Amino acid sequence: QVQLVESGEGLAQPGGSLRLSCAAAGSILSINAMGWYRQAPGKQRELVATSTSGGSTNYADSVKGRFTISRDNAKNTVYLQMNSLKPEDTAVYYCNARIITGWGLLNNYWGQGTQVTVSS
């Protein structure tokens, strides 16, 4: 069984920073892409940033230049550094990972969700 455990939930003022972490644990053979999505109230879940096992990254236009995704492959952990936060960044942030399990199966996993609130 594989789990993604998120941390870093918090409240920040506009212009402030927060850092989210997501650690994958369980029977893991390898991890392909890892990323972050978010869902604001009344809106659909949207991609924030992704990182492939090869090191390529992709960002939503709305966060380019402000957010940075990084990975520690030795710890099976992905991070999201969020700077210059705006009220419109307020959402529940979900970690996502495509993992090949110890049984050789490629599955898509989601974290439990982390609330990020940007408000003065």
Image (cartoon, rainbow, N blue to C red):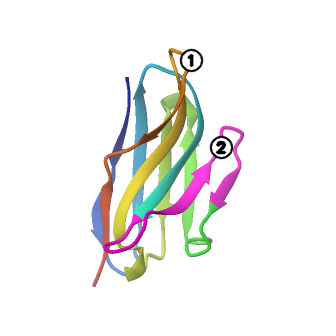
Residue topped by disc 2: 52
- Dot placed on the residue nearer the N-terminal end, 1 or 2: 2
Q: Which residue is drawn at 41% across and 69% down?
A: 17
As displayed, is residue 108 above or below residue 46? above
Quick one: SS at disc 1?
loop
Q: Nearer the viewer, residue 43 or 93?
A: 43
Asked whether residue 19 is drawn in magenta, I would say: no
Callout 1 amino acid: Gly
Callout 2 amino acid: Thr
Q: Point out residue 78 in the picture as x, y percentages from the top left corner.
A: 50, 44
Q: In which quarter of the image is residue 26?
A: top left
Query: Mark 1 and 2 residues: CB-CB less than 8 Å, in contact?
Result: no
Residue topped by disc 1: 104
Residue 68: assigned label: none
Q: Nearer the viewer, residue 43 or 21?
A: 43
Q: Residue at x 53, y 62 (%)?
A: 48
Q: Point out residue 2 in the picture as x, y percentages from the top left corner.
A: 40, 28
Q: Nearer the viewer, mark 1 or mark 2?
A: 1
As displayed, is residue 91 above or below residue 110? below
